[in-house]
Amino acid sequence: MTTTMGLNYIIDCRRCGSHSEYQTSIAVKNSVRTNLAEHIDTECAIRCPICRARLNNSAAEFREQVKISLRE
Ligand SMILES: [Zn+2]
């Protein structure tokens, strides 16, 4: 059973210094819904929309540069 959730990404890129936001939606298993903020996908690249630097080379880099909030 999965749910589609809206996510807001707030990105502070270390490489180009830009601040940007974007919204996306993903399908998640209900079982991971409550700890989604803890779940960081490092297989699928998340990139800065300005300079295309990859933000999730590691979970630590991702946490420094990206804040995720849920959009109900
Ligand atoms: Zn950038």
Image (cartoon, grey):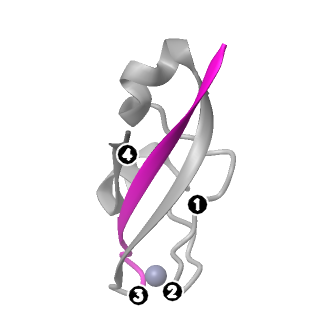
Q: Secondary structure at mark 4?
A: strand
Q: Residue at x 64, y 21 (%)?
A: 2
Which of the two discs, 3 and 1, labels the residue nearer the N terminus?
Answer: 3
Nearest-to-viewer mark from 4 and 2 = 4
For residue 71, the mark is 4
Q: Secondary structure at mark 1?
A: loop
Which x, y percent locates residue 30? 54, 16
For residue 50, the mark is 2
Which of the two discs, 2 and 3, labels the residue nearer the N terminus?
Answer: 3
Magenta run includes residue 29: no
Q: Which residues are magenta?
A: 1-15
Q: Is mark 3 within 8 Å of ligand 1?
A: yes
Q: Residue at x 38, y 47 (%)?
A: 60
Instruction: Identify residue type, mark 4.
Output: Arg
Q: CA distance from mark 4 to mark 2?
A: 23 Å
Q: Quadrant of residue 26?
A: top right
Which of the two discs, 1 and 4, labels the residue nearer the N terminus?
Answer: 1
Q: What residue would you read off at disc 1?
A: 46
